Image: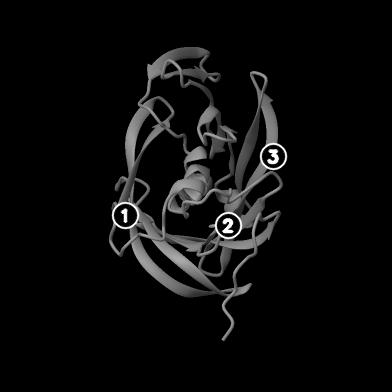
């Protein structure tokens, strides 16, 4: 439960079709119910706003996750992830991670300089700053989702195709990879929705049962929003289901029998 936003973003990094039109815009808001079976453990949201960084208008994406009810009593989680993304290039200029997970806290801000390929990592909790180089076209945990929504060509994907990209998280560069599993019509509370299915590879161990422990169903339309997420954890399993949305840029496709 202490990885609500990370799970959603990892799973969501599977989305989208290459197109001249954007898959999202300012005002988009997604709400997810995180649950173990029928028990609600918490909620998570992703919201797109706008801001100004160094005199340039950018998308400001904010993700929040928190436990509720008995889950909050046993393990309190309050996570905030933010990314400031170039509207044309789909690259991040700033990433913020501020979390409190059962008393384990972090407060980190990363500023990306794409001219020098240097990331300034400001660990506010420990008052430490460091500069780390990163590869070209790098993404952060949040911006990766929105980059793929605009740039991944799903029309030509075949079952079991794999997609990779460069990512930077906390103080490390790593290669993110996911597999395309195929298409199906998913029953949701909104109706039957045509979906794309992806499986991001994760590190097995303390959190996830194995490297193929995550599966995500993404709407097969111009929005490419995550509808259902399943995670097999080291202990038990968890799901995140989309319960509410607003501000979509395109029509939400529902299958009609």
Lower position in the chain sequence, tag 1 or tag 2: 1
Which is more foreground, mark 1 or mark 2? 2
Pointer 1 local density, CA inside 10 Å: few below 14, some 14–19, many at least 20? some
Pointer 3 local density, CA inside 10 Å: few below 14, some 14–19, many at least 20? some
Q: CA distance from mark 1 to mark 3?
A: 35 Å
Q: Secondary structure at mark 1?
A: loop
Q: Say whether marks 2 and 3 touch (CB < 8 Å).
A: no
Q: Secondary structure at mark 2?
A: loop
| Residue drawn at x 44%, y 64% as measured from the top left | 196
Q: Secondary structure at mark 3?
A: strand
| Residue drawn at x 41%, y 53% as measured from the top left | 153
Residue at image mark 3: 49
Which is more foreground, mark 2 or mark 3? 2
Q: Position of residue 178 (x, y in %)?
A: 34, 51
Q: Residue furthest front?
A: 20
Lower position in the chain sequence, tag 1 or tag 3: 3
| Residue drawn at x 30%, y 65% as measured from the top left | 159
| Residue drawn at x 69%, y 30% as measured from the top left | 51
Lower position in the chain sequence, tag 2 or tag 3: 3
Q: Position of residue 113 (x, y in %)?
A: 48, 19
Residue at image mark 1: 209
Residue at image mark 2: 223
Residue 82, relative to residue 19: is it above or below?
Answer: above
**Viewer-nearest residue: 7 or 158:** 158
């Amino acid at each position: 439960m202490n990885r609500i936003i990370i799970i959603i973003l990892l799973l969501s990094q599977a989305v989208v079709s290459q197109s001249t039109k954007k898959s999202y815009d300012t005002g988009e808001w997604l709400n997810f119910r995180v649950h173990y079976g029928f028990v609600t453990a918490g909620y998570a949201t992703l919201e797109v706003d706008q801001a100004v960084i160094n005199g340039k208008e950018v998308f400001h994406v904010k993700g929040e996750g928190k436990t509720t009810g008995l889950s909050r009593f046993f393990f309190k989680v309050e996570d905030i992830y933010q990314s400031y993304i170039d509207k044309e290039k789909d690259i991040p200029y700033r990433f913020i991670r501020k979390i409190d997970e059962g008393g384990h806290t972090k407060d980190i801000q990363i500023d990306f300089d794409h001219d020098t390929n240097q990331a300034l990592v400001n660990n506010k909790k420990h008052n430490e700053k460091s500069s780390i180089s990163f590869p070209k076209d790098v993404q952060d945990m949040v911006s990766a989702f929105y980059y793929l929504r605009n740039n991944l060509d799903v029309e030509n994907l075949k079952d079991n195709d794999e997609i990779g990209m460069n990512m930077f998280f906390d103080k490390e560069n790593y290669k993110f990879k996911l597999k395309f599993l195929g298409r199906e019509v998913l029953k949701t509370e909104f109706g039957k929705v045509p979906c794309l299915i992806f499986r991001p590879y994760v590190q097995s161990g303390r959190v996830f049962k194995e490297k193929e422990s995550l599966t995500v169903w993404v709407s097969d339309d111009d929005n490419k929003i995550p509808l259902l997420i399943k995670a097999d954890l080291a202990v038990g399993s968890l799901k995140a289901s989309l319960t509410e949305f607003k501000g979509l840029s395109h029509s939400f496709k529902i299958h009609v029998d």
